[in-house]
Amino acid sequence: MRPLEDLRIIAVEQYGAGPFGSVHLADLGAQVIKIEDPRAGGDVGRYVPPYAEDEDSLFFETFNRNKRSVSLDLATAAGRGVFEQLVAVSDVVYSNLRGDVPEKLRIRYDDLKHLNPRIVCVSLTGFGMTGPRKQEPGYDYVLQGLAGWMELTGEPDGPPTKSGLSLVDYSGGFVAAISLLAGVHAARRDGVGMDCDVSLYDTAVSMLTYPATWHLNAGFQPVRTHHSAHPSLVPFQAFEAKDGWMVVGCAKEKFWARLCQIVGHPEWAEAGSPYATFASRREHSSDLVPRLEAIFRQKTVDDWLTRLYAGSIPCGPINDVGAALADEHTAARNLVVTTDHPRYGEVRQLASPVRVGDETPTYRRAPQRNEDLALVTEEILGLDAQQVVALRAAGAFGDAEPAHGANTPDTPDSLDTTATSR
């Protein structure tokens, strides 16, 4: 068995943050059943441009491989009934919605424990289910600004800058996955489930880490640094070579001593030098860094990296995305995987970095919307054909669907996603 093959997750999820968290669990064997709102055309991620056609998009493929899909209208009594039957035979209800929506949808533990006392209800929201911002939708871009990330990113004389990736979304997904696994472990041990109130805001603020500790205890005021320099370790930053950029870092004194030899200034590491220690290099960084910059501009990136690698000094080129994907180490770690797709033929995407044991994960394309209705109704719930016909007639599966984006009473406002992904 794969590590999580005995785990069933009902995922009321959409877009990026929530699906990013659950895709790693699906890769590990968990049965992740996506509940897609038929009145909204399903997960909005199906329509994210530029690589999208009808209900297929490469964005959606990225976050939903190895999952199952069923269209279920939770606003109808019949749809709610199917959902509750799933709760009774599942381990987790997992969602990424606005902070006040889990209560409105009645998907918290107190709403569901009568169906399954061991159910774990994981809610990844923008700002949590408590606090003055709980009703606000949380988007990665907004969170990066609110939590101080953008103020810390970019050149000192430039504007506040967003990370090139939606790191709040993705980090929030990982945090939700960790909370989910911890909750299931406790529920199986104790026989009692719970709510896991996870938020992008909490994630973003907690990732301020040691600069926050410095500020809280010593009044430290973080500032943007030249060429992405480390706030305390010198040198540890991006340097421009003759034909491109690279990162060079001296996180230990032994690396600094080796670097001094390579750049032709062994005396910089000697006792009595103003650059001899961590503290003195930081104090004299305005003098030292320009001298290093002038030296590094004299040779190509490859020239320098050859020397730096030989000296076992932390370093690397600043690649574009294509170069990163083509790196021989990317191939060696089996980070690019393929799935077969009815529209795209073969889809190449990235493997999960989560590794458990030495078994190679298997990958299946993301599901078409409502592709797994029979799996859910017949195999999991044991319903017969007449029962399914009756449920369909009662609107459980939303067969009479408006065009995507129609402004029905419960979408998009009450089912607002917590986050987008760039």
Image (spheres, grey):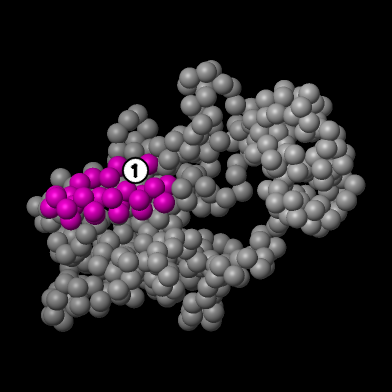
Give the residue furthest to the right.
298
Residue linked to disc 1: 198
Q: Residue at x 72, y 45 (%)?
A: 248
Vertical comparison of 203 with 212: above or below? below
Q: Is residue 280 above or below residue 142?
A: above
Which segment did they paint magenta? 172-199
Residue type pointed to by label 1: Val
Residue 302: quadrant of the picture? bottom right
Q: Is residue 254 above or below residue 81?
A: above
Q: Does 290 appear in magenta?
A: no
User: Which of 123/417 is in front?
Assistant: 123
Of residue 366 and residue 98, the one placed in the foreground of this image is 366
Q: 294 or 342: which is nearer to us?
A: 294
Does residue 236 appear anywhere in the picture? no
Asked whether 158 or 239 is in front, the reply is: 239
The x and y percentages for residue 250 are: 69, 40
Please say whether residue 194 is one of the residues in the magenta stretch: yes
User: How far across and down, in percent of the image, does residue 261 sit?
Assistant: 82, 43
**How dense is the environment of label 1, judged by Cα within 10 Å: few (below 14), some, or many (20 and up)?**
many
Is 132 rendered above or below residue 137? Answer: above
Q: Is residue 68 left or right of residue 233?
A: left
* Residue 176 position in % (x across, y down): 36, 49
Q: Residue furthest front?
A: 271
Q: Residue at x 64, y 31 (%)?
A: 231
